[in-house]
Every structure is written in C-alpha cells, then in structure tokens.
Image (cartoon, rainbow, N blue to C red):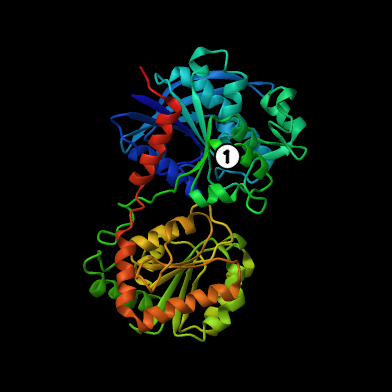
C-alpha cells in the first residue's frame, strides 16, 4: 500500500472558495484504494459550517516554535465518503469570516504556519506518507521545509513531494525580510534560483523549485505556462523544470452532475432521450426568467465569475451585434462591476432575449446547463475550466477559446467528417468569437441532425474523476517506485 497525504488550504465538503476545493474533495475518493491510501490535511477554519465541525474528533495537540512564538497546534480528524481528513487547529491563525483574508501578509503568516504545522503533525497521525501532494501557493513551503528542517529525520527524508498548480496567477509574494522572519528559513534559501523572484520572496516558486514533480490541471496549460504570456514571471523556471512537469485534466463529479438524476432540474434526461426531454427544461427556464417562450430559438448560457480572465471584454464588444441574431442569452454570476452592469444594461435593452442573473445559485446553474443549447466560454486563459465539462455532460454544446483545459476537452466540430463536441476559436478577438458563435447558429438552425449527433458525442465523452485519478496514480507510482 502506498500512502499519499494531500496538504491543501481548502476541500469540499468542509470549505470551498474555488475549483481547488473540488479537486481536493473529489480526487482522493476516486484513487484505487487497493493500492493507495490517500488522506487529506487542511486548516480548521472557524468559518466552517457547524455541521462540518461536528464531524471532527479531537486527536492530540502539541506546541510548535513559529515566528518567535510557541504556538498551539491542535489535530482533529474526521472521515467523509471513505476518506480520512485531518485538521490543524489554531483559532488565532484560522479565525475570521473566510479562509483567505485577502491581506497578503496575513495570509502568508497563516499558510506558513499551516505548512510547518502539517509536517510537524505527521509523526502523530499513525500514518507515514510516501508522498505529499501540495496544492497552490498556500502549501508552497511544504517542499521547502521538507528539504530544509525536516530532512535530518529519516521518516521525512524518504518522502517525495508533488506541487500542483491550479492557477499560476496567485503565488504568495511578499518582502524577503518579512518572509524570512515569519518562516525561520535561512537567508541562503532566498536566492534567485530558490525562493526569491524579482526581489520578493515567492512561496509558490519555493514549492516549484523543491518539489520532486510538478503538475497542473491540463496538458495545454502545462505547455502555455512555459511561455512569457501565460508564465506569470515563472516561465523560465517552468521551462527549466519541464522534465518534471505534466498536465492532468481535472474531472467533475459524475454523481453531482448527472442530468438523469439531477435534483435541481425538473425534467430528467439522458443520452438516449435528450431529443424529447431536454427541450422541456428550456421551456421551464424561459418561463422562470421571463424570456420569449420559443422552442426553436437557440439559447446560449454563461455561468462564470464576471472577470477579464473569462473573456467578458470580448462579449461586451459584440453583444449588441449578437443580440440582432435569433438567440437568447442567459447569464449567471458575479464579478467586476463593469461586467455586472454591462449585462444588466443588455437585459434592460433586450429584455425578452437576455436574462442577467447577477448573483450565484447552484440550482440556477444546473438549470442553465440543462436548458441551454450552447454554452459560451471565451477565456483569455483557463488552467482547466469545469463549466465546459458540465456543459458536455448535459448535452449543451460548448463554444470556447482554444486555451488551457478548454482546448484539451472540447473537440472542434468538423462538418466534413462529422466529428467534434463543440465549437472553438483560436485568437483572443471579439469578431473571431462572433464568427464561431454564428457558425454554431448555422449548424443549430440548418443542420439539426448534425447538431444532435454532436450532443451524442458530447454526452459520451468521459471527464469523470476516475479518468484523472488513473493518471495521478501513474505519477504516484513513478515517483514512489516499488515499495517493499
């Protein structure tokens, strides 16, 4: 049996702010339990829901030297969905109304403490990991600490580490002097080939330098981040480490996202009966949102954070033009004020064909995936993206820009050999996007049999976690080697 310990700042169902939590919550339960024992360690935030805290049992505690203090470290444990979770407890560090304070200095203190405490807790867990799997900058110090202060202990010197980049934009950067003071890591580690980048300390960089392997959440993103445009200042390091870097696409939970059993949608359907049943969800959504009741009109969905990264400047540029077409557009999400107001404006201007829902609702998101004919995702960059995977699962044809995980998961339609699961465009250009949308409209209106065959292929694609888990298992085997 090979032992894997995930160290992460969030994980479903205990705490979630983004896609990282889905990975940490889904991947451990999909790994083959005959060969791997995967456990998770994360902070016990005071803002976790009470029913989640109620699952936790006290295990032990100790005191740890950190930032010139002797700090309390409590360890709690819980089991959920067959996976064992451990929690690091310190109310001063993990208090507050949300997991991340948004103040970089405070977050660096909090997650430096967490990284050191998680490693210090291992000898008390009755579980000796062969490999530690770290996620994003919040755990970037784990591989550093492993090589710096834990390496004298034979138990730790055998452990391998993997660093997974979920989004390279966030790196945990701060002044070198402060970070040295907080972490107690010696000055010799803060050089340009180690933890220092452009005069600052960079926690993610530390993890990328010292981890035994690096993964990111799609093949294309793994290539893109080696270039200056996508590399966020770390492209040189990622090129240097390209032999240790691989992309593994995220999955989605096929039990939560299943149109034949989805509790949020009124009319269930599957790959066999979608031609008859899917349309009923469209009628229900048109009625719910006050759009024109029209079976034939092409309905395009958008469920997203409304930010520049997601390509909303392109949509703003062509929205008036697009609204001249025979389409309905349904938007759900919150984000930058200018995009929230842009969609409110078009809802006011074209009320019977645009519905702007500027909030977030799990229920409405499922209804949009089930009701719409197409799903628009024109991202500037997208490490993996989950919305297009949900759209494919629900037979809602994605229209995407060819970047990151979007390129890896949506196969562009080819009308000559009748292949593909969606539509895509290459350059970050508003009219190239509009041309792609209009090409999709043409197939939808004039070649309905082709459109339905595309839905068949989309719903047959497998992006469940089990497929991704197999790839992670191969990497774990490669790193750990044969265990006696």
In the foreground, 314 or 445: 445
Tell me if mark 1 has few (under 14), some (14-19) or many (20+) residues whose alpha carbon lies within 10 angstroms of its own.
Answer: some
Number of numbered tags placed on the structure image: 1
**Residue drawn at 30 percent across, 70 percent down:** 453
**Residue drawn at 60 percent across, 29 percent down:** 210
**Residue drawn at 62 percent across, 49 percent down:** 169
Rendered location of residue 459, percent (x, y): 31, 62
Residue 387 appears anywhere in the view: yes
User: Relative to 289, is 349 above or below?
Assistant: below
**Residue drawn at 28 percent across, 75 percent down:** 280
Question: Which image quadrant: the C terminus?
Answer: top left
- Determine which residue is flagged by label 1: 242
Q: Quadrant of residue 415?
A: bottom left
User: Relative to 31, is 463 above or below?
Assistant: below
Question: Which image quadrant: the N terminus?
Answer: top left
User: Relative to 412, is 119 above or below?
Assistant: above
Rendered location of residue 32, percent (x, y): 31, 35
In the foreground, 198 or 212: 212
Q: Residue furthest left?
A: 272
Q: Quadrant of residue 112?
A: top right
Rendered location of residue 126, percent (x, y): 39, 18
In the foreground, 53 or 227: 227
Q: Residue furthest front?
A: 416
Residue 284 appears anywhere in the view: no
Badge 1 element = helix
Rendered location of residue 133, percent (x, y): 48, 33
In the foreground, 259 or 164: 164
């Amino acid at each position: 049996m090979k032992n894997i310990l995930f160290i992460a700042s969030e994980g479903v169902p205990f705490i979630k702010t983004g896609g990282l939590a889905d990975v940490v919550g889904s991947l451990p339960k999909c790994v083959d339990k005959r060969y791997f024992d995967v456990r998770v360690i994360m902070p016990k935030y005071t803002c976790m829901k009470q029913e989640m805290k109620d699952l936790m049992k006290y295990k032990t505690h100790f005191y740890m030297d950190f930032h010139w203090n002797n700090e309390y470290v409590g360890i709690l444990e819980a089991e959920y969905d067959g996976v064992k979770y451990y929690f690091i407890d310190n109310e001063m560090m993990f208090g507050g109304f949300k997991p991340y304070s948004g103040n970089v200095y405070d977050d660096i203190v909090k997650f430096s403490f967490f990284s050191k405490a998680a490693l210090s807790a291992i000898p008390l867990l009755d579980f000796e990991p062969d490999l530690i799997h770290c996620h994003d900058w919040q755990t970037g110090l784990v591989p550093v600490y492993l090589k710096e202060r834990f390496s004298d202990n034979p138990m730790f010197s055998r452990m391998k580490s993997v660093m997974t980049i979920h989004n390279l934009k966030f790196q945990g950067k701060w002044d070198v002097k402060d970070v040295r003071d907080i972490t107690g890591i010696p000055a010799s580690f803060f050089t340009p080939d180690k933890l220092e980048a452009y005069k600052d300390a960079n926690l993610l960089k530390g993890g990328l330098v010292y981890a035994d392997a690096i993964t990111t959440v799609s093949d294309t993103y793994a290539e893109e981040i080696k270039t200056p445009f996508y590399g966020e200042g770390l492209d040189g390091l990622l090129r240097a480490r390209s032999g240790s870097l691989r992309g593994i696409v995220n999955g989605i939970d096929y039990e939560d996202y299943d149109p034949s059993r989805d509790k949020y949608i009124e009319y269930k359907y599957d790959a066999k009966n979608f031609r008859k049943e899917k349309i009923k969800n469209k009628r229900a959504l048109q009625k719910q949102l006050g759009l024109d009741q029209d079976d034939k009109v092409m309905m395009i969905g958008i469920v997203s954070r409304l930010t520049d990264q997601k390509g909303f400047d392109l949509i703003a540029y062509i929205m008036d033009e697009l609204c001249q077409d025979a389409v309905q557009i349904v938007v759900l999400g919150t984000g930058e004020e200018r995009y929230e107001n842009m969609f409110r404006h078009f809802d006011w201007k074209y009320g019977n064909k645009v519905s702007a829902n500027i909030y977030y609702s799990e229920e409405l998101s499922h209804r949009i995936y089930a009701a719409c004919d197409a799903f628009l995702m024109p991202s500037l960059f997208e490490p993996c993206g989950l919305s297009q995977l949900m759209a494919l699962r629900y037979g809602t044809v994605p229209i995407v820009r060819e970047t990151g995980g979007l390129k890896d998961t949506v196969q562009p339609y080819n009308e000559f050999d009748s292949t593909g699961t969606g539509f895509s465009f290459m350059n970050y250009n508003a009219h190239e996007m509009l041309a792609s949308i209009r090409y999709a409209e043409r197939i939808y209106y004039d070649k309905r049999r082709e459109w339905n065959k595309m839905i068949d292929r989309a719903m047959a694609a497998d992006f469940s976690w089990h497929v991704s888990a197999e790839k992670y298992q191969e990497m774990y085997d490669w790193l750990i080697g044969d265990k006696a």
